[in-house]
Image (spheres, rainbow, N blue to C red):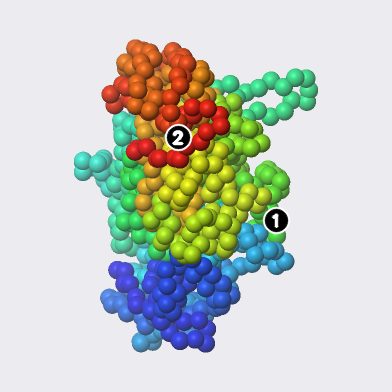
Amino acid sequence: MKFTQSWRLRAIGGEWFEAHVPGNIQYDYALAHDFGDIHYGMNHKKFLEIEDWEWEYQTKLSYTAAPGERVWFVTHGIDYFYDIAVNGEILLRHEGMFTVTEIDLTDHLRGGDTLSVFVHKHPKAPGKPADRNQAVGSVKPAVSYTWDYHPRILPSGIWDETYIETRPAHPLGEVYLSYTLTPDYARADVHAEIEGEGAYRITLRDREGNTVYDGEERDFSIENPHLWWCSGQGDPYLYTWTVAGEGGCRSGEIGLRTVELVMNEGAWREPAGFPKSRSAAPITVCLNGRRIFAKGSNWVLPDMFPGNMTEARYEQHLRLVRDAHMNILRCHGGSGINKDVFYRLCDRMGIMVLQEFPLACNNYTATPAYLRILEQEARAIIRRLRGHVSVTIWCGGNELFNAWSGMTEQSLALRLLDKLCYELSPERPFMMTSPLNGIGHGGYTFWDDGMACDCFAQFQHSHCTAYNEFGVPGVHSADYLHSIIPPEVLYPPRPEENWIAHHAYDAWSGNRDRWLCSDIVRRYWQDTNLEELVSGTQWLQCEGYKAIFEEARRQWPHCSMAMNWCFGEPWKTAANNSLVSYPCEPKKGYYAVAQSLRGVLFSARIPKFDWHAGEEFTAQIWLLNDTPQAADGHVEVSADLNGTEYPLAAWDAHADVNRNAQGPEVRFTLPDAENGTLTLRLRAGACSSEYRLVYYASDAQKIAPTMPET
């Protein structure tokens, strides 16, 4: 039986205050010492004063044990260096935050016992600047040391489920059900790994509650199994299992599927002469023998304090993911690992997970100490997550094969991770890092100065096998900005500390306002107030994301994956590429992306965003279909210029299963009119689409932006 405990907390030598478990030390300290709204202004900098403090959790143990039962302390995660003591006696010293720690306390108890957790200083690589480089010698996620969406706030403490548990003398340990599907998917051969002495009864039931297997054999078969499919491709079917015996009982869910990463169509290339070079890396997801287009977003932790994440908060975010017709999330290596409930919800909602290990944008050098902790933590991560059918791809980490990281396939950390994934979870593909050859990261703005074009043209001239990161920033609403930026510096935005801290400026080196993008707004409009700046960036984010996602889909099957940077954010920013504002508020861009990711829709390939009187407007019309059914439809194409509509074309379309169809190209010489909005409409019932572009009467004039309703 599990018993939760009441905890208190203090800085070493300081006064006690209430602790939330699971939670994070720094959040509890801020509550107890009235830091105020940590999202407002520069309040977050108050955490710098306590960054290098050490801490003690304490609880008076409370539980009831039956005769013969043992008393265990169990924690699913404490961040990051810690000791565990009972009545002042240290029982464990540990480094790492993802390993489940279990300690048999029985022989150390005498009644009225006190258990303490001592949390030591954050790991910081010596001689490194105060940024993500300090994470290079540890397995603590780099994001909290500062990132372009996260301030420097280093959380620590008991961040995951923690409790006292009474167990029999010989308790049931880990249970893992692995399986092999026959090539025709007519049978699943299941093997149960059970840590425990004696006989255990295994019961497997289908979703309707019917018993599929009931017995003590650890190898059994399921005839004509239901397969697990990701969202949009079928039913994310799950069976439930129970393992019970004298040592206890465990239960869970299991989904049955096969997954591979296979070569993209046209990705093999024949280099001229010798020696031959490598081709693009395989990145097409083949699920249950079916090649699919993976569409989704990059997932970063939705809170600076991961201990605060609950099942309800995870579910709120993941419902938005599913409702946006996404079928995959890339869990970014800079952000670490989510709580188990996140993956359980992904299992149930049919959301695939590309899971990166906690390596990002650093050269994780192969010291014996680092490799020892990496192996310990990676083993724990793999064993924790391998039972989740949604975990589809393992990845070593984010952007490791770059000049700023300097790692290669020969780096021992990555060779170790590859080995562990092969040993513990061989049925899943492993990628060394993202990006690899053929895969794109970027761009991250609506207009690219280097290419001298907008994202419409940029991605139409790109030929990647996957777009694993790309972004179009949008400034949050004026009301939202009022909640984080002091009024005296709210407008006009400028590179002072509040706007910088909330990532409008200096989010990454050499790009002063790449998330705010005020210069890009001024390229198209003459902004005159805060509301119009917001309106302009949100307009660009909506149309930019639609253009990129739909272009990536049009490039199928050569391109097979598209994930924007990023889905949400862990605190209130002024501007970001995110689709969802903290804590969980969809932006206008979210709804635009949801429209572009419908399984079947009519789509327009439009050369650019801005148009002028006298130009010939052109657009290619497509029917996009990434579903397992053929699609048919009739579309009426028209252009609306400031309320005057011009019919352009009609098309009766057919697209095969998981295939797109290219239709007519429309052409239209733009007449003289007042500055305003040029809207291309594709009317086709549930498959309709709409594109709102900017129109100028002459090159010299600009207009004030008014964000159209989405």
Badge number at residue 365: 1
Q: Are marks 2 and 1 in contact (CB under 8 Å)?
A: no
Whether residue 206 is visible: yes
The secondary structure type at the circle numbered 2 is helix
State the CA–CA distance, disc 2 to disc 1: 42 Å
Whether residue 468 is visible: no
Question: What is the quadrant of the C terminus in the image?
Answer: top left
Rendered residue at 35%/45% (across/down): 320
Q: Residue furthest right?
A: 274
Tag 1: residue type?
Thr
Viewer-nearest residue: 667 or 425: 667
Question: What is the quadrant of the N terminus in the image?
Answer: bottom left
Which comes sooner in the sequence, label 2 or label 1?
A: 1
**Residue 649 x %, y %:** 38, 13
| Neighbour tally class for label 2: few under 14, some 14-19, many 20 plus, Cα within 10 Å | many
Rendered residue at 45%/63% (across/down): 487
The residue indicated by pointer 2 is 543
Look at discs 2 and 1 and give the one toward the viewer: 2
**Residue 509 x %, y %:** 65, 52
**Residue 548 x %, y %:** 50, 32
Relative to 675, say whether 522 is above or below: below
Rendered residue at 58%/50% (across/down): 513
